[in-house]
Amino acid sequence: MLFAGTLNTALVMISIGTGTCTDSSHEDPIPMSGIIITGMSGMSADSGAIAGMLSIVLGNCGHVGIIVTGSSSVTGGGLARALIGAQFTGAFTGIIVTGATTQFTAI
Ligand SMILES: [Zn+2]
């Protein structure tokens, strides 16, 4: 159940990001998807570590982006939790599109 004012929590090795990779090794920017590979220490849900600001998203091409948006009210270790819709930037830039199915975080 999704409660008002919450979104699915983003999880390491579960949440998918989609966007574009602009690394110069590609002839042109290419559509790319990838997965979150780092999270916030000691925090987990749905058998996955919870991701947050500064978590790394690894594109299928091998390039990475860093999550730069998160919850405005829920933090861990001083960093905001990441939710579905979180933005990541870097060579690989995009948005997190999947998350926990039973764990939600206040927007
Ligand atoms: Zn790439």
Image (spheres, helix red, strand yellow):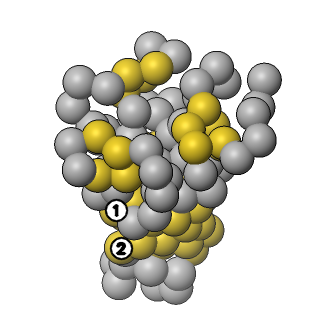
Where is residue 95? Give x, y as percent: 58, 61
Q: Which residue occupies the foreground of this view, 75 or 48?
A: 75
Q: Front-most of 105 and 67?
A: 105
Q: Earlier in the sequence, mark 1 or mark 2?
A: 1
Q: Name the element at disc 1.
A: strand
The circle drawn on residue 90 is 2
Q: Is residue 9 above or below residue 26?
A: above
Q: Is residue 58 visible?
A: no
Q: Secondary structure at mark 2?
A: strand
The reply to whether the residue tagged 1 has its Cβ within 8 angstroms of ligand 1 is: no
Examine the rendered structure and indicate whether residue 15 appears above or below residue 34.
above
Pointer 1: what residue?
66
Residue 105 percent location from the top left of the image:
56, 38
Q: Residue at x 45, y 63 (%)?
A: 69
Check if mark 1's residue and mark 2's residue have beta carbons within 8 Å: yes
Q: Nearer the viewer, residue 80 or 85?
A: 80
